[in-house]
Every structure is written in structure tokens, then in C-alpha cells.
Image (cartoon, helix red, strand yellow):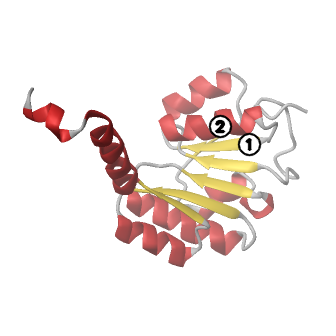
Amino acid sequence: MSGNGCEPFDWETISGHAIIAGFGVPGRAVGEFLAAEQTRFVVIELNPTTVHRCEHRGMHMVEGDVREAETLRRAGIERATFFAVTVPNDEVALAAVRLARELNPNVHIMARLHFISNGMEAHKLGANEVLIEEQIVAQEFLRILKKIRPTQLQNA
């Protein structure tokens, strides 16, 4: 079975799947990786335009707010093995991590947060891995600075 998120499955019994919360650039990257790995996944998305566009392509979409238990249940959180929280809002991400951990103590949670303090909170709430945007941006600044060197900038 291909894992591109397009195969039919029974929403009541699906298990061992991944859930992606948010389908912007980070969520799509996670989805592409999961599809390449033949892992079935469901996307939770708040934007109805995105939901309808992706559904027309055959993707498994759940329209709703990831902070609501019913939305997570419709995506099968109790039986999922992986949950990627890629939404661009720290408050929403933290609430989603807390609720997902409450509904499924065994799910592996990866979360995107903007700030270090919220990343620490996400770990406390049950995230296994946290990607902190301000740290990633800082690393990229350093990578580029090392490449161009400040002395080159003085002569610009």
C-alpha cells in the first residue's frame, strides 16, 4: 500500500498512521516525507480552501481546529503512531501537544514552535521532539555568515 495519503481507509479503524496538523510549507514537507516512506497519513487543516483543494487530489483531510478533541479523534489520534504539529501559532501548537498526549500517551509528537520558552513548554506537555524556529533561523544566519565572512561585508 502506498503511503501518499490518498488510499481509501476506514476512518473508524485506521491505526498505525501519522497525523499532520497544518498543511503549510512545513506540513507539506512532512507529508512528502511520509508519502515517500509509504506511511499513511491524515492532515488536520483549519483552512477550508486548503482542505477542499487537497481532498480533490485524493488526500485524507480533516477540517477543524487541532485544539479540539473531536477534531483529533476524527483524525484517529487514539490509534496514530506519529503526530506532527506544524501550525504557525505557538498557543495552538501547545494546546494540540497537550491534548494529543492526553488522548494518546504513546503517540510520538513532533512540534514546531517559534520561541525557546514555548519549546521548553511543549516538551513539558509531552512533545518528543521540538523544532524551534528562532534557533533554526540563528543556525542559518551563522551558516551563511561563515560562508561569506564579515570581512567580505566590510568591502561591500
Q: Quadrant of residue 41?
A: top right
Q: Is residue 88 above or below residue 4?
A: below
Circle number at residue 31: 2
Q: Amino acid at mark 2?
A: Gly
Percent of width and height locating residue 102? 65, 74
Q: Residue farthest to the bottom?
A: 124
What residue occupies the far right of the structure in this picture? 1
- The correct choice, above or below, for 11 with respect to 51 in the image is below
In percent of width and height, residue 122 lies at 49, 70
Residue beneath disc 1: 41
Provide the secondary structure element on which disc 1 rests: strand
Residue 92 seen in this snapshot: yes
In the displayed structure image, the side of residue 146 where residue 69 appears, left or right = right
Identify the residue at horizontal 66%, vertical 21% (top origin): 56
In the rendered structure, the answer to whether residue 117 lies left or right of residue 2 reads left
Counting residues from the start of the chain, the first of labels 2 and 1 encountered is: 2
Contact between labelled residues 1 and 2, with CB atoms less than 8 Å apart? yes
| The furthest residue to the left | 155
Q: Is residue 2 above or below residue 122?
A: above
Towards the viewer: 75 or 86: 86
